[in-house]
């Protein structure tokens, strides 16, 4: 169940439920409790944004 999520802070997929926090899911590496779905990686989104910006700059240069 937890393998489907990764830490938004460090990208670590090792998530444990901390008993001292009432079973709240926390990242093993950095202790963050904010996670995102593994399927949508931030890197891919960033690459897409850079590609759009690059095309936009190229478009301006041509004009
Ligand atoms: Zn983390």
Image: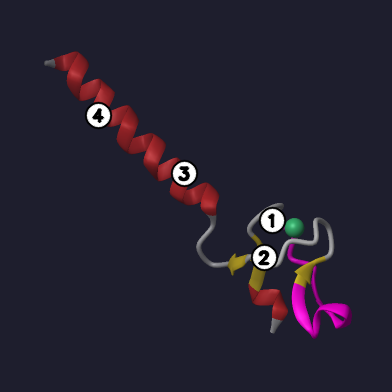
Contact? badges 4 and 3 (CB < 8 Å): no
Q: What separation in Å lies between label 1 and label 2 (alpha carbons)?
A: 6 Å
Q: Residue furthest right?
A: 20
Contact? badges 1 and 2 (CB < 8 Å): yes
Q: Residue furthest front?
A: 21
Instruction: Check disc 4 and report its element: helix, strand or loop.
Output: helix
Q: What separation in Å lies between label 2 and label 4 (alpha carbons)?
A: 32 Å
Q: Which residues are magenta?
A: 11-25
Q: Residue furthest left?
A: 63
On the image, numbered disc 1 is attached to which residue?
Answer: 11
* Picture residue at 69% right of the left edge, 84% below the top: 1
Q: What separation in Å lies between label 3 and label 2 (alpha carbons)?
A: 17 Å
* Picture residue at 39% right of the left edge, 44% below the top: 48
Q: What separation in Å lies between label 4 and label 1 (alpha carbons)?
A: 30 Å
Residue 54 drawn at (x, y percent): 33, 28
Q: What separation in Å lies between label 4 and label 3 (alpha carbons)?
A: 15 Å
Q: Is residue 16 left or right of residue 42?
A: right
Compared with 2, 60 (above or below) is above
Instruction: Check disc 1 and report its element: helix, strand or loop.
Output: loop
Q: Is residue 49 magenta?
A: no
Q: Quadrant of residue 29?
A: bottom right
Q: Disc 3 or 2, which lies upstream in sequence? A: 2
On the image, numbered disc 2 is attached to which residue?
Answer: 6
Instruction: Check disc 3 and report its element: helix, strand or loop.
Output: helix
On the image, numbered disc 4 is attached to which residue?
Answer: 56
Q: Disc 4 or 1, which lies upstream in sequence? A: 1
On the image, numbered disc 3 is attached to which residue?
Answer: 46
Q: Is residue 46 left or right of residue 16?
A: left
């Amino acid at each position: 169940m937890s393998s489907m999520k990764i830490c938004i802070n460090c990208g670590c997929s090792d998530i444990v439920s901390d008993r001292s926090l009432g079973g709240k899911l926390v990242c093993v590496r950095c202790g963050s409790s904010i996670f995102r779905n593994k399927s949508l990686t931030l890197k891919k989104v960033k690459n897409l944004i850079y590609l759009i910006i690059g095309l936009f700059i190229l478009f301006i240069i041509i004009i």
